[in-house]
Amino acid sequence: MAGYRDYNEKEVHTLRFIQRARRPGVPVQSIRQLLALWQDRNRTSAEVKALALAHVTVLDRKLADLQAMRRTLQHLIAHCKGDERPDCPILDDLAGQSTELLIEDTRPNLN
């Protein structure tokens, strides 16, 4: 069969379901739960909605962290003269040598 695998119609639908669930970044464990709910005709839509809402909360947290990182980088860029001198607040911050409190306040919580 030259390394190809034949899938039946049910398997193709399952693979498409998984592929579509991965697009918005749903983690594997949540995809397992969604897949089980999809296959369970006795499910409630409330269960599905709860999983989706939990993922939106995670996405919102990631978005807030990315926005904080962007603000920090924009602040550093604004304070870098970008000239021929070696002084660079971007490198100072990365090296932990920055003294500006604003930079510290805008960093995302990575814990």
Image (spheres, rainbow, N blue to C red):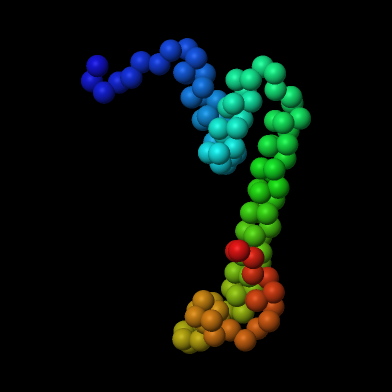
Q: Is residue 96 left or right of residue 69?
A: left
- Can residue 74 be spotted in the picture? no
Q: Is residue 83 left or right of residue 99?
A: left
- Count of numbered badges drawn on the protein: 0
Residue 7 at x, y = what percent? Answer: 40, 16
12 above or below 50?
A: above
41 above or below 18?
A: above
1 above or below 81?
A: above
> Which is more toward the observer, 75 or 42?
42
The residue sitting at 70% across, 47% down in the picture is: 57
Q: Quadrant of residue 31?
A: top right
Q: Is residue 6 left or right of residue 106?
A: left
Quadrant location of the N terminus in the rendered image: top left
The residue sitting at 47% across, 12% down in the picture is: 9
Residue 25 at x, y = what percent? Answer: 57, 41
Q: Quadrant of residue 108?
A: bottom right
Residue 79 at x, y = what percent? Answer: 62, 79
